[in-house]
Image: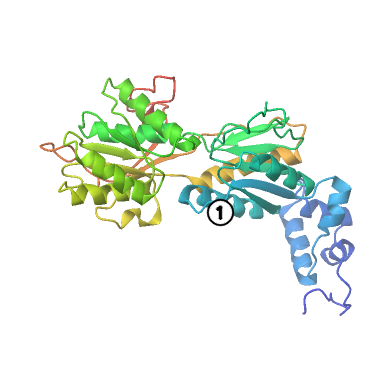
Amino acid sequence: MTRGTGRSGNTAAPRSVDVARLAGVSQKTVSRVFNDEQYVSADVRRRVLDAAEELGYRRNNAARALASGRTRSIGVVTLGTALYGPASLLMGVERVVRDTGYALRVVNTMEGDPAGMAGAVDSLLDQGVDGIVISEPIDEEAIPGDDGSAAPRLNVPILVLGAPSPVSAPLVLTAGDGADLMAHTATEHLLELGHMTVHHLAGPQRWYAARDRLDGWRATLTAHGRAVPPPVEGDWSAASGYRAGRELAEDRSVTAVFAANDDMAIGLIRALTEAGLRVPEDVSVVGFDDIPVAAYVTPPLTTVRQPFDAVAQEGLKRLVHAIENPNAAPLPSSPPPVDLIIRTSTAPPPNRTIPARGRRTAARSRGGAHHPPLPNGGPATHH
């Protein structure tokens, strides 16, 4: 049968009443199925969906928006960048939003444009979105003379990923924090191998994630009573990691480096190798992200895997619940997993025995082996 013609061959677009007649249910039941309401049995739901597919029925979202006051669309404000972290997080958000049946509207901001956030939010509000996801990883400087009174103030639920909220709204949800815990796990791994301290190749400090990773590294060393070397700042690129590696190679006391992302770690390893240092025999290196190539460089890179899909799934579930249940309490948040992928770029310092390798998953401590907590009261980890 050709879709959209119905059993009678009529070329008119099928309506919900046609689906109800074919499925042998009421029109209200069809509405309940397509609104994903409760109190519809699995058998009835299947009959309605089968009938809709046979008829080629598609619900009229425009009419539904008029009736409900919602457009079933979610807006996303994101930095226009091809960097692995922000791009992967956006892809995760796109997948989850479409799975929820909502339309997605994306507005990119540009680095160095303090007014970009307000303009992006205004654009999405003009389109009538039901909620907004803000994935803006950079702390932009304020416009001279701006006292903050022009900051966006919203009347739709907001989900902020991995940063403090830059807007005012009745409901602001957060997800994707915990970079300090991930940095703690990476630094802890190197200390457990026997390194006396860990140097840090930091990301640009205008980025919230770079600051969180630096804070987690510093807090872990402090908690262990270890020396805290001055961090070297890069710009997320392999080229900046290479430059940092040439600098660190001049200090032959360096035995371990935690890099704030994998690209910088790869550039760092290249520079160390050119300087005659072996990785991991002379210097151990841990990255952050677990980019696809990390397992195939020489040596394969030990790194912290970012849970982009888990963050998107968790955050969007809470945002959609807030949109559809405006009078209900927000769903509770849960911490993202911390996954340390141990490969062959890390080892004990010279003259130490190498322990077994593999994969470790860290979580917020609920018992088991204890590691020193972060000094600021952050959670301990267990493996």
Residue drawn at 64 percent across, 45 percent down: 77
Q: Is residue 250 left or right of residue 14?
A: left
Relative to residue 11, is residue 237 depicted above or below? above
Residue drawn at 78 percent across, 66 percent down: 51
Q: Residue furthest left?
A: 351
Quadrant of residue 210 in the image?
top left
Query: Are there few (<14), some (14-19), or many (20+) residues within 10 Å of tag 1?
Result: some
Q: Is residue 185 left or right of residue 206?
A: left
Q: Is residue 108 visible?
A: yes
- How far across and how far down the image is residue 118, in percent? 69, 39
Q: How is the image coloured?
A: rainbow
Quadrant of residue 27 in the image?
bottom right
Type of the residue with mark 1: Met
Quadrant of residue 189 in the image?
top left
**Nearer-the-camera pick, 276 or 336:** 276
Q: Is residue 100 visible?
A: no
Q: Circle 1 sits on which residue? A: 91
Residue drawn at 75 percent across, 62 percent down: 49
Q: Quadrant of the N terminus?
A: bottom right
